[in-house]
Amino acid sequence: MAGLTNWTAGSVILKGTDTADSLLILIKGSVEVVISDVTVSMSPGSILGLGVGPGEVYGCDYRVKTDCATYACPYTADEGLESIFTEYAKLAPTMTQQAVRNAHKSYNALLELLEAAKAQYSAVMSRLQAYPDLCRKTGDPINDYSALSSFPKPPEDTGIDGWRVNFIKSLISLENKKDELLTNRSGLSIGLTGMAVDFIKDVRSKISEVEKYRKDLKTASTEFMMVFSALSSKKTALASGGGEDLSSLTGLFDRILLYSKLPADQTTEIREAMQEYKSISDRYGISDDIRKIRRRLSNAFYPLYEAVLMQSIKERNIPIYVKLFLMFGLLDETLVTQEELQTLYGFASSYRPDPKGHVMCAYEWLYRIYSLQEEPSRNEFDMDYPAYLREQKNNGDITAEQEKKLLNSARNRLHFELSNMFILGNRMTFGRISVFEPVFDDVNVIGSMERGYLHADRINEELNQLTDRDFSIFYRNDIYSNPDQNITQLPIHREFRPNFILMPVMGSRFALWQEIEGKKRQSSARVLVPVIMSEDIPTAMTKLCGEFRWEMCKTEQGVHWNDMRDPSLTAEYTDYLQFYKKNSMITADIKEKIKSELKKHNNNYKAVFVADYTDYIRFESNGSLRLLKNAREILAKYCPFSGKAKELLSDNPQYKPYIERFNNHEARDRRIIALTIKRFEKEGIEVPQELKDEVTYLSH
């Protein structure tokens, strides 16, 4: 390939696999260099093959874009760029100019490729985020794509030093002076060209990395993207009336009764109660007669629910119509519209348990009680299951032997939970006591069912948004001990996330049933929520957490919960509200505001605190100050902000003293933990998970 050669459009001048034995000066026409899947156009004066050492492969294809001519120059270890620039001194300014231009073009190609990688990643992740809701609409099972969701993000930038990019841009701005600057200055031409060559090498390397990232992402996401596309088409078909065949749900009431194996007398009662209820012309009415009908239906409903639940426990392979009943209380398909039936079917078909086990449907929770995985909840008289049996024995209703037997009776434990927490919890989460009935009915559907559906992902998302502001809320004080390392009592914190039980109703209220399990302070709270929420979910979650803060403090403090000799959240808040009139530090205007708040909440200190906590989390965390100074001071002390909220308010005069005090306290604790961890590392012992978790806790 020596001397002058003419090329026609479409020809390949150099192949990526060819060994470099010459460099070609582009005399006329244009050529495209293909770097991975990126194409860079080269103009006359460009040196083809630049950046490759003698004897190496070119690594890129050079294709003719328009008819062109090249001149080949020998390229050996002894005869490199210097010989070319010396022999063709008159072309040196143009060759340098094109080298710099090509460097800049290559960088722009890298930028475009990086943006394409980001767009590709964003498209996959946005579909992954939408995937569960799409399955809930189509009724398809939600498969696990956690491996894809943890696929690394593309690089944020090119990885090329900014000063090098700016230098290239500066050289391009001097193009109109190239002859003046470079003529008869071969050393400067060679130096600038060499710099451009190094730049191009680095850019090509980055292009290869980004191209590999895009191919790996495509390989990892191909199956999911095909599934998502198919589900999107299915959703479109559903919207246009081509939905699932729901004929299997026809005669739902009779099929559930058959499945339940309910005794004949109870079957007759639920049939009559259902028939009477369906005959009401205004099922939303509140007359005494209608309430009596609802009460009869409720009384008949729960034995049926228990019977169906027992059958599902025995079979463990729950038909979809049974799942609809256990999850939503759907007993008769004629009480809902076809669209609502389709929506509930989608929810039930796509349902998957919470991987972390903290959010579960009511029937899943009841199975935990039956299988002795969890202790039954306290009843409405705040009495746990052992205390209830003990009272029965003391009253002479059962013998000591029966008490011992019933204590671990799966059936009796389940019945206790159903008769107490489940029945009352269903009513509480429904919210509108006067019109409550446990059967899912279209008249009780308020707002969007899809927007209100409280699946595990939604609950965890809402809870995480709150703990991003109030990180310490579910942590309890504990002690770490390791005698082998001479550690007797090291204060640490352990997190106990609440258990959320999805009650089979569409309702308007979250209810904190109990803040701990029995008398075990190191345990999770039990929260009852409607499986479909008709009110604002973030507000309900915040109020719930405010109530938890109050009740947990009372539990930890015991009889001293309102005793200022043992300061605590409840003690200080009670003191603040109880004696505000005598507080000389509070102005008359503020006293009137406190009086108004107390009146608004029927003089209930807990209710005032929950309202203040809600404002604290929803508004003050964003810098919108609404609380009175005294309330803010107590909340900042016992419910310190974390994360972005703490960062945002760190310079705010209203919060700065509290945040500094909290940071100093955390810094002291971090030093103690760091010294303890160093001791393990020094002796080559793996650091205990408890200490790693404490580092995480203290980093917020």
Image (cartoon, rainbow, N blue to C red):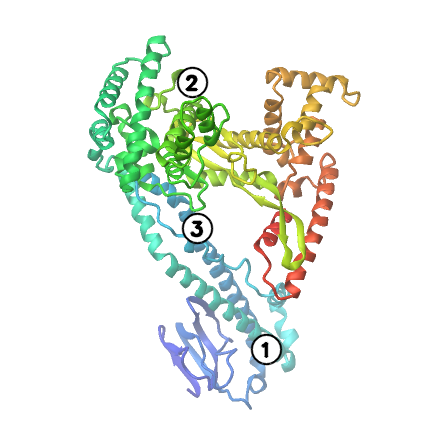
Per the image, label 2 sits on a secondary structure element best described as helix
Q: Residue 125: which disc?
A: 3
Mark 1 or 3, closer to the camera: 3
Label 2 sits on what residue type? Ile
SS for dot 1: helix
Residue 628 in which image quadrant: top right
Question: Horizontal and vertical percent for residue 444?
Answer: 36, 22
Q: Is residue 537 left or right of residue 658?
A: left
Q: Nearer the viewer, mark 2 or mark 3?
A: 2
Seen from this angle, which residue lies furthest bottom?
78
Snapshot quadrant of residue 554: top right
Question: Measured from the top left, where is residue 518 in percent x and y?
Answer: 51, 34
Amino acid type of the residue tagged 1 in the rendering: Gly
Instruction: Give residue 433's mark.
Output: 2
Q: Residue at x 39, y 31 (%)?
A: 402
Neighbor class of circle 2 (other Cα within 10 Å; few <14, some 14-19, many 20+) is few
Mark in the foreground, 1 or 2: 2
N-term-proximal mark, 1 vs 3:
3
Q: Which residue is mark 1?
A: 194
| C-alpha distance separating marks 1 and 3 | 41 Å
Q: For residue 478, which numbered disc appears in the image?
A: none
Please tell me which residue is depicted at 30% across the width and 36% down the height of the picture: 323
